[in-house]
Amino acid sequence: MEEIRIYCENTKSYTKVPMGTTLKKLSETVCPDILSRNGRALPVLAALVDNKLNSLDYKIINPHNVRFVGYDHPDGRRTYIRSLCFVLQNVVRKMFPDKVLAIDYSLPSGLYCEIREVDAMEDGRPKVHFVTDEKLQEIEDGMKELIKADLPFTKVMMNLEECEKVFSRNNQFEKVGLFKTVGRLHNSVYFLDGQADTFYGPLAPSTGVLDIFSITGFNDGFCLQYPMDGDPDRVHPMKRQSKLATALKEHSDWCSVMGVRGVGKLNAKVLSGEIVDLINLSEALHERKYADIADQIYARRGSVKIVFIAGPSSSGKTSTSKRLALQCRILGMNPKVIELDNYFVDREFTPRDENGEYDFECLGAMDLDLLGRQLNDLLDGKEVEIPRFDFVEGRKHFEGNMMQLHEKDILIMEGIHALNPAMIPSVDPSKVFRVYASALTSLSIDENNNISTSDNRMLRRMIRDNRTRGVTPESTIMRWQSVRRGENRNIFPFQENADAVFNSAHIFELPVLKYYAEPLLRRIAPSSPAYVEASRMLKFLGYIVAMTPAEIAAIPPTSILREFIDGQTL
């Protein structure tokens, strides 16, 4: 039998295998375990074949570069979580055959899930079947049994008619609608212990590798917790961040009220020509939210003189600050804006990270003494000279930009540390109103495949930075993990300090982002280290029907999306 030459990136060596050898067999031969950063041996979950992610049942028929991935790799983690979701789906379907599991959205501690009545609604929202602690324990025990049995995940190709029958029987009508709008004649379907489901990425070879997880009751449903990124022996600790969870739940309910719980329904709106109506409704919701936050600030006008806005990358913080300023003006307030970026310390005083690079995102990169002193002076009615930071020179300049706060004036400032009390420890907290802005999408692909808010934001950033800064899509992808680390350190721990949460996600935005992002992603060559992520994003976007330029033109010039796609008049 002909032998194929393979280069294994994990061992940095070549090996020869018979044609038709599976990746699983190859991994058992040359790379049975992958060592995580803390030295623990982790099982192989999937593999990158020429920078494209594949499950371990992939058969080798040509020479390839292969890199096996475990839980210490982002694609390994996603593979683990997808597989764990199938185990959960399997158990819930057996215990509640007349119900449907909805894996709704991401929480800081895991995935928020609900068991819902089939096609039953209350006030326009899906009717949730409440699950007792005893039943949650039964679900967890059932998952442990499947994992202990080490059952294989198997994949088969099924035609469209077969898929519609199988998933209609499973009460997964969002999935059926997705199949119809995407229109593929054949689809990959996974099976576990006789039950079928679809996942938009490979699964682990078998259930036995999924031994770290937990289920905790949360709100009307429960949270499926999976291992921590840097500590695969422990699940993410449960964080009951009520303000964030409320914003996510609110968006999920609103999607249901609009009749768009999944991508299939969104695609149908685009295909039927109804998307412009959805644009108008979503923009009206945003306007209502801006007005509500302005009302809260106005109600505290006797004390509040400073509004801080914070949020992760590409959440639309700049548009949020401008739209909020407009609403404050309507109420008779006079907003003034100071950019927190002008309060960086001079370059030579900037802290460095563990790699010796300047860490511009840490709190120590801010001139906190100057900021606190000037804010207190402004609150006391004094006039101050606002600095301008020159990013080329790396130092502040004072150029006579004077500011003073009068009776109806209110100061609006936006920056990554705006929710951290340590930024202004000397300022009276009763004088400050804090807003957390983020694109907290609760739209799902279908019942058991949620959409990552991080992916949504990365697409926004890719489009904007390519358009305004000439940054390549490849560069955006390669920098994204560093951006995420900064968010995890400097933003997410302080979310609950916000007085108000603004969800900048639009229910209609994925068909817009697809129109702009897909051509950018297709430019990335297979040899690029960003190719694997580009391929994943292209696969995700492949389930979405793009808007036409005429439909995109209906997005108003004040929309938060215009900050990313151009045409904003704020």
Image (cartoon, rainbow, N blue to C red):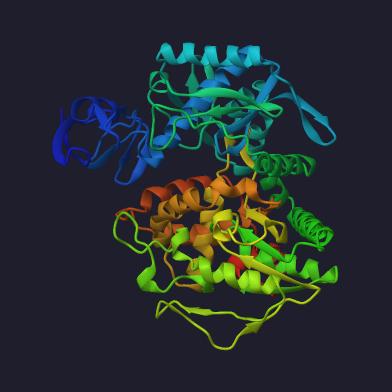
Q: Position of residue 217 (x, y in %)?
A: 64, 24
523 vs 266: above or below: below
Q: Observer-nearest residue: 129 or 497?
A: 497
Q: Quadrant of the N terminus?
A: top left
In the picture as drawn, the residue positioned furthest to the bottom comes out as: 400
Relative depth, front residue between 295 and 508: 295
Q: Residue at x 48, y 59 (%)?
A: 363
**Residue 131 visible somewhere in the drawing:** yes
Which residue does the image show at 38% across and 58% down from the upper left? 524
Q: Is residue 541 visible?
A: no
The answer to whether 248 is drawn above or below residue 192 in the figure is below
Task: Tell me which corner region of the image, top left, top right, bottom left or bottom right, holds residue 457.
Answer: bottom right
Image x and y of residue 505, in percent: 66, 53
- Residue 262 versus residue 335 in the image, above or below: above
Q: Position of residue 512 (x, y in %)?
A: 62, 58
Q: Is residue 391 left or right of residue 179?
A: left
Residue 446 sits in quarter: top right
Residue 315, image x and y in percent?
Answer: 60, 57
